[in-house]
Amino acid sequence: MDSPLSAAVLRALDLAVFRREGPDHFRLDGDPPAWLAAIWPGVASSRVLAQMAEVAPFLENFLPDAEVHWNAGHAGRARSGPWIESAPDGESHPLEAFALCLNGAPLLLVERLGDDYEQRRATLQTAREHLLAYERLSMEVQRKEILLHCVVHDMAAPLQNMMMALATLDEDAVLPELKRVIALGLQAGKKQEAMIDNILQIYAAELSALFGRRDGTWPGVDVRATSERAAEMLRPQFAQQGVRLDFDVSGVRAGSLPIQGDEPHLERILSNLLGNALRFSPPDGSVRVKVWEDNDNVHGAVEDDGGGVAPHIQAQLFQKFKQGAVGRGRVGLGLYFCRITLSKWGGEIGYKRAAAGRGSCFWFRIPKVQVRPRSGIRSLTPPPAANTPADVAPP
């Protein structure tokens, strides 16, 4: 250990090597590394490591394990594991100690861990932070699941019992006035069922990474039939409130279209937009719906004769629990559902003033699945964003 070559090796490895001379008494072999003088200046000057409890408490805790290793004469080395030692100037130094037997002589090696250790420590710290974030996310999902079960159990079951009772009364009722009251109760119950179903759909949409099939392909959608079905479901409500529904789907061909979407969610999007327009339309007003296609997209626009949306609310329209007017609408999930669904399809939705200058117009765009002529492979990459209905004239 005293040869020039050994000294050069110790300097290159930046190790402090101590020979054990007795219990809790070690002598430095070779020149002290620079970091040793910074951390333990007394040890570097005296070349003696003693009174370990005062100099390095962590190192003292390692000595019993080192003693076992020395006494057993094991090959290899026993590791203390890394620890942080503070220098007199306050700087922190990561260290690690090793117990080693060389030609029967017990040695204690101390190494200052360098950049590799810092990089590993930073990686582990990042991994721990990601794990904590994942655990927090899992807890949030669990809380949502609990809330969802509460909504389904505590609201849906009593509501169904109430509607069954109203339906029974409706069959037995004779007075027209009583029938009208029962009809209003049934209508309110159906709206409540729709709201609960909307909450379920929002929850499913937020957890789903992609609407469509698991292999990434998309089923064809009969856009015309789906649009007409959504309108027919709401026509009785339009007639009851005296609002005219003008529906034009002549710009989209009949049959299945290869769009990035599915029929149930497209029908819900149209139902949300139609229901929203109906709530804000005055009596004797009208709601105008157009659905059409071009080479790359399917477009839709729903206009009403209401008062429009105030400028300070427009930026919040498609956020969760936001409404276009105080005291109107429901819990503010319909437009949010439309936005996140269309976004997952690679499409978009927006708001503008109606063409007549009063009322609102909500428009949306859904990209078609692009088919390569030679291979017939469908591409899920949406085409470049098309102009909004404000700039594209429907056929």
Image (cartoon, grey):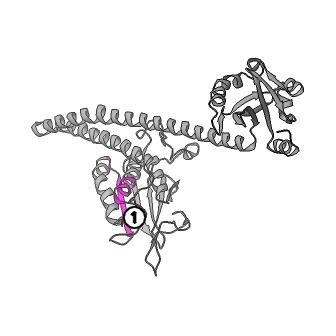
Farthest bottom residue? 374
Residue drawn at (42%, 36%) of the image: 142
Query: Is residue 371 visible to us here?
Result: yes
**In x, y percent, where is residue 95?**
73, 33
**In x, y percent, where is residue 163?**
21, 37
**In x, y percent, where is residue 353?**
53, 54
The reply, left or right, for residue 227 in relation to residue 94 is: left
Q: Quadrant of residue 48?
A: top right
Residue drawn at (70%, 43%) of the image: 119
Farthest front residue? 104
Figure check: 261 above or below 58: below
Figure check: 184 above or below 55: below
For residue 261: magenta? yes
Give the residues drawn in magenta, as a range: 241-269
Inspect the image, locate mark 1, and give the three-letter code of the amino acid beneath it: Trp
The reply, left or right, for residue 6 in relation to residue 187 is: right
Secondary element at image label 1:
loop
For residue 294: magenta? no
Few, some or many residues within 10 Å of mark 1 (<14, 14–19, 20+): many
Q: Quadrant of residue 298?
A: bottom left
Residue drawn at (71%, 40%) of the image: 118
The quarter of the rendered structure image containing the N terminus is top right
Residue under circle 1? 218
